[in-house]
Image: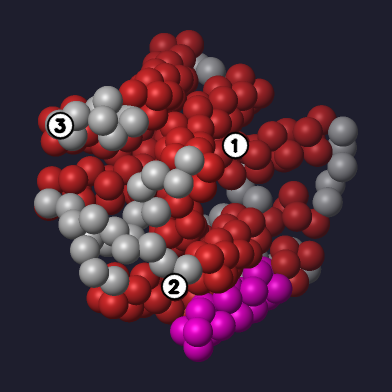
Amino acid sequence: MTIVLIAVAAYLTATLLLVGAVVQDRTETARAWLAPALLGVATHGAYHLVVAWRTPGGPDMHFFSALSLVSLGMAGMTSAVAARGRMAALGVLAYPLAALLLAVYHGHGHAPSPALEWRLQLHAWLALLAYATLAIAALLAVMLWMQERALRRRLFRPWLRALPPLTELESLLFRTIGMGFALLTLTLLTGVLFVEDFLSQHLVHKSVLSFLSWLAFGGLLLGRWRYGWRGARAVHWTLVAMALLLLAFFGSKFVLELVLGRS
């Protein structure tokens, strides 16, 4: 319990410091948020390691644990990106989300997991990393939409100055999507190679939705390369593709585990 409180407190402290830096337009110079953010990421990860050590079988990949792990990946990537450039404002969304999902995971309890061989564990970890990366892309898409909307209406808010220029934010969005698309491709390939019986494990709908998301992200990258897609079109494609991915993994896990009571 103590390690969870430390992680949540660290995340929320980082969020408050970031909000203050954004309001004062000091995100490039004020780095006080970074230390509590890194502490939150470290203790968040340590909590999952402790749970994995105490839980028999394989790593806990159930619904709330998977959500917490994805938010951990998002918080870690946010800290790495924000510490090197003008993307600190991303932490205002990522850190409280990580704190919330960690607290929910801790409060919900931990179910024993079946033992997984290394190939299935590789597939699962690739999937979680892909979801975390593409979730960051979805947040960037929302920020891009908000920035474009504010500029069109000439609403020059303090948070707008905390963001990088529009072209730089758009470039970061597509780089993130490219990385997530590569990870999602590896996830689908390892699933095809290593998962033996899709029907008995109720994976058909999950696989179909994941493939549709892969097509959407791939189509967006192709449109960017071939036709120079940007702006609202890029935002819409990103959010639609991410919605399909959320339905594929967390939607199916919610129905199977929480509604139908199957692991």
**Residue found at x 65% / y 51%:** 163
- Does residue 169 appear in this view? no
Please, what secondary structure does the residue beneath circle 1 have?
A: helix
Residue under pointer 2: 44
Earlier-in-chain disc, 3 versus 2? 2
Please, what secondary structure does the residue beneath circle 3 have?
A: loop
Q: Main secondary structure of the magenta part?
A: helix
Total labels: the figure holds 3
Where is residue 53 drawn, in percent x and y?
A: 25, 76
Where is residue 213 drawn, in percent x and y?
A: 43, 25
Q: Quadrant of residue 189?
A: top left
Label 3 to label 2, Cα distance in Å? 33 Å
Please, what secondary structure does the residue beneath circle 2 have?
A: helix
Which of the two discs, 3 and 2, sits closer to the camera?
A: 3
Instruction: Please provide the residue range marked out in magenta.
Output: 1-18
**Residue found at x 42% / y 19%:** 212
Earlier-in-chain disc, 3 versus 1? 1
Mark 2 residue type: His
Q: Are marks 3 and 1 in contact (CB under 8 Å)?
A: no
- Does residue 124 appear in this view? yes
Q: Is residue 233 above or below residue 136?
A: above
Q: Is residue 103 above or below residue 134?
A: below
Left or right of 242, for residue 155:
right
Q: Is residue 232 above or below residue 261?
A: above
Label 1 packing within 10 angstroms: few (<14), some (14-19), many (20+)? many
Q: Does the magenta segment cover residue 224?
A: no
Residue under pointer 1: 141
Which of the two discs, 3 and 1, sits closer to the camera?
A: 3
**Residue found at x 23% / y 43%:** 123
Left or right of 114, for residue 86:
right
Label 3 to label 1, Cα distance in Å? 36 Å
Residue under pointer 3: 196
